[in-house]
Amino acid sequence: MRIQETADEVGLTTRSVRYYEEPGLLKPAARSEGDYRLYDETDLERLRFIKGLRDDAGLLWRRSPNCSRTKQPASEVTPPTTPQPIPPNAGDS
């Protein structure tokens, strides 16, 4: 199955399929004589899994109260607080 058919079957764009190939999350099962990517059922299952993870992560991201989709100027971003070290002998009295 070629890339457009694969993308349509899984509900992705061809650009997304190529994007997942870049870091090695997906590798086409074969190449045609014309050097077209060819995918098999195993590839479809893997793409469905990746898409599910992406969709779940997006849902969690949108629900998290600490995440914002809008970019804030650096001057408005509050750095995380770091715990202060406990001085040695602090518990000895």
Image (tube, rainbow, N blue to C red):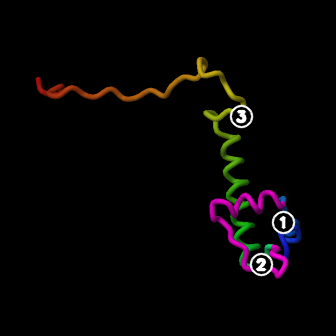
Which of the two discs, 3 and 2, sits closer to the camera? Answer: 2
- Position of 17 with respect to 72 (left or right) is right
Q: Which residues are magenta?
A: 14-36
Please report whichever mark, 1 or 2, sits nearer to the chain's N-terminal start: 1
On the image, the x and y values in percent for residue 51 come to 73, 60
- The picture places residue 13, in percent across and down from the top left corner, at 84, 59
What residue sits 76% from the left and 73% below the top? 44
Sequence order check: which comes first, mark 3 or mark 1?
1
Label 3: which residue?
A: 69
User: Which mark, by number, is residue 22?
Assistant: none
* Mark 2 residue type: Arg
Which numbered marker is on residue 31?
2
Q: Which mark is residue 7?
A: 1
- N-term mark: 3 or 2: 2
Give the class, few, some or many, for how many residues have Cα within 10 Å of label 2's Cα (few <14, many ≥20).
few
- Tell me the kind of residue under disc 1: Ala
Residue for point 64% across, 35% down = 67
**At 64% from the left edge and 34% from the top edge, which residue is drawn?**
65
- C-alpha separation, residue under disc 3 versus residue under disc 1: 27 Å
Count up the numbered dots: 3
